[in-house]
Image (cartoon, coloured by chain):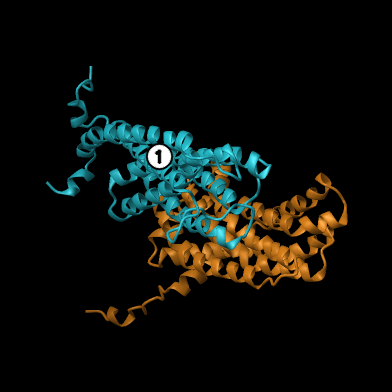
Amino acid sequence: MSLYQFSSPATFYALAGRIAPWFAGAAAVLAVTGLWIGLVIAPTDFQQGEAYRIIFIHVPSAWMSMFIYLVMAFWSIVALSFNTRLSAMMAQALAPTGAWMTFIALWTGSLWGRPTWGTYWAWDARMTSELILLFLYFGVIALRNAIDDPRRADRACAVLTIVGAVNIPIIYFSVYWWNTLHQGASVSPTGTKMQATMLSAMLVMAVAAWFYAVAVALWRVRAIILERERGSAWIEGLPGMARA
Amino acid sequence: MSTAVATVPTEPDYGVLAAVRWAVARDLRVALRSRAELGVQLLFYVIVVSVFPLASSPDRALLAAMGPGVLWVASLLASLLALPRLFASDFGDGTLEQIALSPYPLPALVAGKALAHWLTTGLPVVVLAPILGVQYALDAQVLAIVAASLLIGTPILSLLGGIGAALTLGTRGGGSLLALLILPLYVPVLIFGAGSADAWRAGLSVAPNLSLLGAGLLITLVGAPFAMAAAVRIALD
C-alpha cells in the first residue's frame, strides 16, 4: 500500500468519500466556535465599533482565496509534470471554491469599507489585486468550459493557472509596493497588533474556511471522477450505478 | 558503387537564433502581404484613442491627466485585437503542426512569431502614441515617457498574449474568452506603464516604473516562449 495508489481516481474516489464528512464536520464545529468567540466574546473595537466584526469572515476568505490558487497551481504543476489525471481533477474541483472565496472577500470587504472608509469601493492595491484574482479564477473556469476534450482542458488550464500564479506574489507584495488607503497587515509573524480574543476568533474561522474548502473540493472531485470515468467497470460496480 | 557519399549536405543550423530569424521573417512576410489588415488595426488604435475625449470633456487639464492611461489602455486593446492572427490561421491550415514538427526548437519559433506580432502591432503603436498624445495636451517630456514605457511594455503584451492565443486555439468562445484570459495578466504592465507618466507628473523619478517594466520584459522573455510552446503542443494534440 503506497501513497501513489491514491493517484488512481478509483482509489481516491473511495478515500475522498470517507474523509470529506470529517472535514465538513470539523469545519462546522470550528465555524460555530469561531463565530461565537468573534461575535459574542470579542470586545467592541474602540475605533471601528461593531463593524470590524466582519473581518471574521473577510480575512479567512481573503486568505483562502489566495491559498486555493496556490494549491491549484501546485496540482497544475503536478498534472503537467507527471501527466496524472487526478491532479488536474483536483485543480478543476478547487477553482469554483476559490472563486467563491474571492467573491466573498471582495463583498465583505466592501461592506466593511462603507462604515470604516466611507466608501464601498476604493482602488486600493489589495482590493484591485483581489479583483484581478477573481478574473483569473473566471478565466480558468471559462477556459475549462470552452474545451470539449477533458484531457486537453486539463493541460490548457494547468498552463493558464501556472502563468496566473505569477499574480499571487504581486497580490502579497502590493501592500508594500503601493502605500495606499488599505490598513497594513494586522497579523505578522513578529508580533500582532490585535487583541488576543479577536485574533483567536479569526484564526479559528480561518481553519474552518480551510476545512470547508477541503470538504467541498473532495466532494466536487468525486462528482468529477464519476462524470469522467463513467463507462469504466469500477463505476458500474458502485451501488446504484449499474446500467439499466 | 557510385560516389553519392561525396554529396552529403552540410548539417543545417537548427539553433535558437536561426529559428527566431526564420519565424520573424516568415510572419513579417505574411503580414506585409495583407497590409490593409495592418492598417485597419492601427486605425482601430487611432479611433479608440480619439473617442475618449468625446465621452468625457475637452478640458485640457483633464485630458492631460487621463492621456497616458488612455494611450496605454488603447494599446492593450489593439494588441488583444491582433492576437488571434498570431496562431489561428496557421492552426487552421495545418502550418502550425508542421512548425511544431520541425527540428527547430518550438519555444524559439513561437518567440519569433510573438516578435513579429510586436513588430507589426506594438512598434507602430509606440510610434503613433506620441502623435496621438498631442490630442491630449501632453507635453514633450510626458510624450517621451509614454513612448519609452510603451517601447518596453508592448513586447510583454505580445509575449503574454501569445500564451492566451495558443491556449484558446480551436476553443468555443473566441475573442471574448481570449480577453478574459489575457487582460488580467496585462494589468501589472498597465499599472507600471501608465504609472510612469503619473510618477513624472507627481515630480517623482520614472526610473522605478521603467525598471520594473524592464524586469517584467526580461522575465516574460525567458518564461513566456516555453508556456507558449507548451500551449501550442496542447492545442495540436
User: What x and y, as percent, mark residue A214?
Assistant: 34, 40
Residue B146 in the figure: left or right of residue B98: right
Which image quarter: residue B229?
Answer: bottom left
The outermost residue toward the left is A1
Chain letter for the cyan part: A
Res A53 visible: yes
**A159 over A239 or under it: above or below:** below
Residue A7 in the figure: left or right of residue B42: left
Q: Nearer the viewer, residue A58 or A174?
A: A58
Res B84 visible: no
Q: Chain of mark 1?
A: A
Residue at 18% x, 31% y is A234
The outermost residue toward the right is B59
Q: Is label 1 in a helix, a strand or a loop?
A: helix
Residue at 41% x, 67% y is B104
User: What x and y, as percent, mark residue A197?
Assistant: 44, 44
**B3 over A61 or under it: above or below:** below
How many marks on residues?
1
Q: Tell me, what hue is chain B?
A: orange
Residue at 25% x, 32% y is A17
Q: Nearer the viewer, residue A188 or A176?
A: A188
Q: Nearer the viewer, residue B205 or B235?
A: B205
Quadrant of the snapshot with the C terminus of chain A? top left
Q: Residues within 10 Å of mark 1 (few under 14, many from 20)?
A: many
User: What x and y, as percent, mark residue A88?
Assistant: 34, 45
The residue to which callout 1 is attached is A209
Which image quarter: residue B61?
Answer: bottom right
**B77 over A114 or under it: above or below:** below
Amino acid type, residue under disc 1 in the picture: Ala
